[in-house]
């Protein structure tokens, strides 16, 4: 039989995992190409032969997603796999229409074909949207599990922006490990806070290899999701974080709604900074779509170093990049903190933006009073640094999960914003974890 010819649409994460776990060494399929979006500088590369397997001695080319209709015709493609996250249901169906108009089938892949099974207990933390609060939730869960005497290995959703073969399986236990693998700002934002808490974090490209290595040193695998993607591993306890700042998004974005419907526990986060009516709206959505899920209410308390330095000043707020871009938030913890501390002015960074940072503002028109910390490579980090230093700010408020001063030289006074998870009322999560573990 002729092999089914496939293109996988992705963003250097879920797409590679779907290939590794289902298509690699599968003679029924021939993956002729990947396409890339969301992340800069992925297209034009290739998925290397050393990772692609014996069926692909030349590797697999990666193209820009904009070329998809022409690629379907060029390669006589039978099937297109949609394999990235944090996009609206409407967007997914527009892509489906484009693919079908070009003559191919359109496919989404679910847990049965993509989730790997572990010999250890697995706890998964996911979200309905980027920026809901997965990171602080994962840190909190890791602390609760560690307090029971069990060893935790955190496995983070992929962010392979460098040499893919060198990033096959990466283990992070120190800042030196971050330097060793030349981590970008986006990667450091996810890994550093765990390292600060004494945790070991894994990430990379081949999540079967990663899982088997992590199992050798841990009693519990803690999946730290990216965007609003579903877990790569079958879980014994699935926690989803829901954001009351974006009511309605929990059932209108892919695959966040899948997480909502699959989860054992739904955490409504950021209640301390949300409108009560919006909190109630997302609570009703959880009950309607997953009535068996246990609901936990939580705050996301914000602390700021040297808070008195912000009052009355011209402030440039730098926030987590993905939360603001494809997460579509117009503000984050940094803006909330600056306003609470009485900043005199939140500077519009757009007139001072350079290069790709200027391009980010052009693409995401909802951003104005803050600067997204885009840092997907050395050049972009330098452009971010120059944009910050070009501004007339008297104080820089760093609302990113890491201290940007570790990776760039900021020539102005700066203060760091931190945020954690705090259960409201009687803490329930430790008890729910104990039942599973």
Image (cartoon, rainbow, N blue to C red):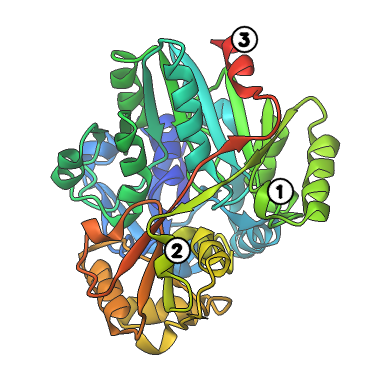
* Residue 184 image offset from top left, x and y in percent: 27, 55
Q: Which residue is rendered at x = 42% and y = 35% of the image? A: 23
* Front-lying residue, 314 or 435: 314
Q: Earlier in the sequence, mark 2 or mark 1?
A: 1
Mark sitting earlier along the chain (3/2): 2
Secondary element type, mark 3: helix
Q: Residues within 10 Å of mark 1 (few under 14, many from 20)?
A: many
Query: How many numbered marks have been drawn onto this rendered protein structure?
Result: 3
**Image height check: is 226 above or below 238?**
below
Residue at mark 2 to residue at mark 1: CA–CA distance: 22 Å
Helix, strand or loop status at disc 1: helix
Q: Which residue is mark 3?
A: 435
Residue 319 tag number:
2
Which mark sits nearer the N-terminus, 3 or 1?
1
Query: Dot 1 corresponds to which residue?
Result: 250
Task: Report the side of 243 relative to 419 (left or right).
Answer: right
Residue 55 position, x and y percent, is 29, 36
How far apart, in angstroms, are the residues tagged by discs 3 and 1?
Answer: 27 Å
Q: Residue furthest front?
A: 308
- Vertical arrangement, residue 117 with respect to residue 398, above or below: above
- Crowding at label 2, few (<14), some or many (≥20) Cα neighbours within 10 Å? many
Q: Is residue 70 above or below residue 241?
A: below
The residue positioned 46% from the left and 30% from the top of the image is: 223
Relative image position of residue 12 (x, y in whole percent) = 38, 50
Task: State whether residue 38 appears in this view.
Answer: no
Q: Secondary structure at mark 2?
A: strand
Identify the residue at image location x=69%, y=57%. Answer: 246
For the residues labelled 3 and 2, the Cα–Cα distance comes to: 37 Å
Q: Are marks 3 and 1 in contact (CB under 8 Å)?
A: no
Where, by quadrant of the figure, is residue 261 drawn? top right
Q: Nearer the viewer, residue 52 or 387?
A: 387
């Amino acid at each position: 039989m002729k092999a089914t010819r496939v293109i996988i649409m992705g963003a250097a994460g879920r797409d590679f995992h779907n290939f590794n776990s289902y298509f690699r060494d599968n003679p029924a399929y021939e993956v002729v190409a990947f396409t890339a979006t969301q992340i800069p500088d992925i297209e034009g590369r290739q998925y290397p032969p050393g990772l692609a397997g014996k069926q692909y001695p030349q590797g697999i080319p990666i193209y820009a997603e904009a070329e998809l209709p022409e690629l379907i015709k060029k390669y006589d493609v039978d099937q297109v796999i949609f394999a990235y996250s944090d996009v609206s249901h409407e967007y997914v169906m527009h892509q489906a229409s484009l693919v079908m108009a070009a003559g191919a089938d359109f496919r989404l892949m679910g847990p049965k074909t993509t989730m790997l099974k572990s010999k250890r207990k697995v706890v998964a933390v996911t979200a309905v949207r980027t920026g809901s609060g997965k990171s602080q939730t994962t840190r909190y869960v890791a602390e609760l599990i560690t307090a029971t005497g069990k060893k935790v290995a955190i496995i983070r959703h992929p962010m392979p922006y460098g040499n893919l073969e060198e990033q096959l399986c990466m283990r992070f236990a120190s800042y030196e490990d971050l330097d060793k693998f030349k981590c970008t700002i986006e990667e450091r934002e996810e890994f550093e806070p765990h390292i600060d808490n004494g945790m070991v974090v894994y990430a990379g490209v081949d999540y079967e290899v990663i899982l088997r290595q992590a199992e050798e040193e841990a009693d519990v695998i803690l999946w730290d999701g990216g965007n609003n993607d579903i877990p790569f591993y079958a879980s014994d306890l699935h926690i989803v974080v829901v954001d009351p700042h974006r009511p309605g998004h929990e059932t209108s974005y892919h695959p966040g709604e899948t997480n909502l419907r699959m989860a054992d526990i739904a955490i409504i986060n950021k209640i301390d900074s949300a409108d009560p009516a919006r909190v109630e709206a997302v609570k009703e959505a959880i009950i309607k779509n997953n009535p068996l899920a246990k609901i936990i209410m939580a705050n996301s308390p914000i602390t700021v170093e040297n808070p008195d330095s912000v009052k009355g000043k011209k402030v440039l707020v730098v926030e987590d990049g993905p939360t603001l871009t494809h997460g579509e938030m117009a503000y984050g913890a940094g803006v909330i903190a600056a306003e609470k501390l009485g900043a005199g002015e939140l500077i519009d960074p757009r007139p001072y933006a350079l290069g790709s940072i200027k391009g980010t503002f052009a693409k995401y028109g909802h951003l104005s009073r803050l600067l997204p910390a885009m840092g997907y490579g050395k050049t972009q980090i330098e452009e971010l640094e120059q944009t910050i230093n070009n501004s007339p700010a008297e104080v820089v408020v760093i609302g990113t999960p890491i201290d940007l001063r570790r990776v760039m030289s900021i020539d102005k006074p700066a203060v760091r914003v931190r945020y954690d998870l705090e259960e409201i009322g009687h803490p329930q999560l430790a008890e729910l974890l104990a039942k599973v573990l």
